[in-house]
Image (tube, rainbow, N blue to C red):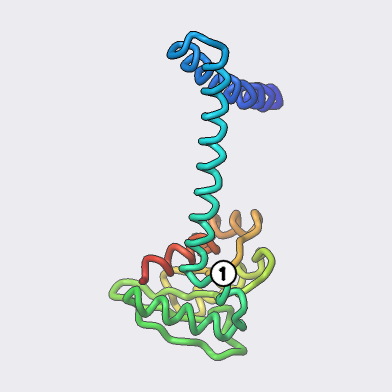
C-alpha cells in the first residue's frame, strides 16, 4: 500500500515537469531559440495563474449570488424556515415540527411518492455523527421513506460513513448553494 502511494507521489511530481517540458519544446519548435523556450514557459505559467484567479473569483461570485453569508448569520429556526421555503420552491409540501420533542426532525417534506424527514443544522463547524443518529431515529417515528440532513457547513468523515450505512442523504454547504442557485 505504501509503495503505491510513493509511486503516485512521484507521478504527481513528474507531471508538472512533463507539462513544462512540452511547453518549452513548443517554444523551441516555433522559434528555434532559448528565448522561445523561456517565453513559452513564462506565458504558460501566467496563463495558469490567470486561470486560478479567474476560478477563485468565479467561486466567490457564486457564493454572493447564493446569499450563503446571510445563511451563516441566521439562527437555527430561521435556517429551518429558509430550508422550508427552498423545498417549497422545489415542489415539496413542507410541514414544521415543534422546536422541542421533535425526535430529531425539523422539517417533514411530502411529494407524491415519499415522506422525507429533514434535520436542519446551521453550524459554523463540521456536523458530526449525532445529527445522523437523530434523523435515523426520526425516520421510524414519522413513518418516513427517506431521511436527510441539511447544513450550511460540512460533515465529518464519521457522519458521512454513518449516513452511507443508514441511507441518509446529506446536503452540505456546496450542495445547498447549488440548490439555492437552481431555485432562482
Asked whether 30 or 53 is in front, the reply is 30
Asked whether 37 or 59 is in front, the reply is 37
Outermost residue to the left: 112
| Residue pictured at 69% horizontal, 24% vertical | 6
25 in relation to 49, above or below: above
95 in relation to 177, above or below: below
21 vs 5, left or right, is left
| Residue pictured at 54% horizontal, 23% vertical | 39
Q: Position of residue 92 (x, y in %)?
A: 35, 77
Q: Splitting the image into 4 quarters, where does residue 182 fall?
A: bottom left
Q: Is residue 168 at all visible to an observer of this figure?
A: no
Q: Is residue 105 at all visible to an observer of this figure?
A: yes
Residue labelled with disc 1 = 151
Q: Splitting the image into 4 quarters, where does residue 14 fall?
A: top right
Q: Residues within 10 Å of mark 1 (few under 14, many from 20)?
A: many
| Residue pictured at 57% horizontal, 27% vertical | 42
| Residue pictured at 52% horizontal, 81% vertical | 80
Q: Position of residue 127 (x, y in %)?
A: 65, 66
- Report the number of numbered marks: 1
6 in relation to 154, above or below: above
Q: Position of residue 99 (x, y in %)?
A: 59, 89
Asked whether 101 or 3 is in front, the reply is 3
Outermost residue to the top: 32
Q: Quadrant of the N terminus?
A: top right
Q: Position of residue 128 (x, y in %)?
A: 67, 64
Q: Quadrant of the C terminus?
A: bottom left
User: Element at badge 1?
Assistant: strand
Asked whether 131 or 180 is in front, the reply is 180
Amino acid at each position: 500500500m505504501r509503495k503505491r502511494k510513493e509511486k503516485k507521489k512521484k507521478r504527481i511530481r513528474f507531471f508538472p515537469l512533463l507539462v513544462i517540458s512540452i511547453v518549452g519544446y513548443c517554444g523551441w519548435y516555433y522559434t528555434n531559440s532559448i528565448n522561445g523556450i523561456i517565453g513559452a514557459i513564462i506565458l504558460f505559467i501566467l496563463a495558469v495563474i490567470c486561470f486560478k484567479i479567474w476560478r477563485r473569483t468565479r467561486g466567490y461570485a457564486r457564493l454572493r449570488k447564493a446569499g450563503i453569508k446571510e445563511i451563516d448569520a441566521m439562527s437555527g429556526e430561521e435556517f429551518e424556515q429558509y430550508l422550508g421555503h427552498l423545498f417549497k420552491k422545489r415542489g415539496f409540501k413542507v410541514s414544521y415540527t415543534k422546536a422541542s420533542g421533535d425526535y430529531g426532525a425539523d422539517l417533514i417534506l411530502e411529494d407524491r411518492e415519499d415522506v422525507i424527514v429533514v434535520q436542519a443544522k446551521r453550524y459554523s463547524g463540521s456536523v458530526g455523527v449525532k445529527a445522523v443518529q437523530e434523523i435515523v431515529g426520526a425516520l421510524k417515528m414519522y413513518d418516513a421513506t427517506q431521511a436527510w440532513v441539511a447544513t450550511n457547513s460540512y460533515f465529518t468523515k464519521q457522519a458521512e460513513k454513518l449516513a452511507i450505512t443508514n441511507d441518509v442523504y446529506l446536503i452540505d454547504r456546496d450542495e445547498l448553494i447549488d440548490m439555492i442557485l437552481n431555485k432562482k
